[in-house]
Amino acid sequence: MCRSAACPSSRAAVELVPGAEHADITLAVRGGRLESRAATSELPSRIDDLQQEVDDGPCLQAIWEHETVRVDDMAHEDRWGSARCSPSSSTPPSRTWARSIC
């Protein structure tokens, strides 16, 4: 799936971060939009889209506040209430993104 020059970095993250199954590199582009540039699968891109839809979430915090954000279990996380469940879906992302390092 990944066709960017940054893909080796995403794949390395999956190999080096214990428990990681997916990775992505997300960039802030013109107009304050975020673009998924080096996803190892469709899942990280979907999670990025959800966070942008609700304007909340660990990766947005990492990007806009220039800090590393670690989440060991999104199902038990309360820092991003609106990012835990999409307004257009009853499926909480915590079922698909248990661990996140942004």
Image: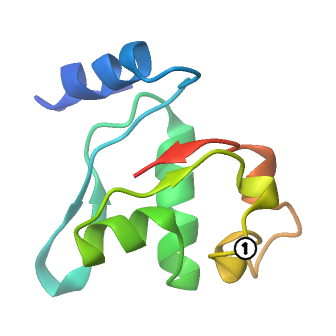
Residue farthest to the right, as pictured:
90
Q: Residue at x 53, y 80 (%)?
A: 56
Tell me residue 86's x, y (percent): 73, 73
| The N terminus, quarter of image | top left
Number of numbered tags placed on the structure image:
1
Residue 64 x/y as whole percent:
27, 77
Q: Is residue 99 left or right of residue 64?
A: right
Image check: 40 left or right of 5? right
Against 16, residue 65 (above or below) is: below
Name the residue carrying label 1: 78
Above or below, comparing residue 45 to residue 13 in the picture: below
Toward the top, the furthest residue is 15
Rendered image quadrant of residue 34:
bottom left
Q: Nearer the viewer, residue 18 or 3?
A: 18
Q: Compared with residue 88, is residue 2 higher up or lower down, i.e. above or below?
A: above
| Front-lying residue, 88 or 18 | 18
Q: Is residue 66 left or right of residue 102?
A: left
Is 33 or 20 nearer to us in this picture?
A: 20
Residue 60 pos. (x, y %) = 40, 71
Q: Amino acid at mark 1?
A: Asp
Residue 9 location, quadrant:
top left
| Label 1 crowd (10 A; few <14 / some 14-19 / many >=20) | few
Q: Quick check: 31 left or right of 36?
A: left
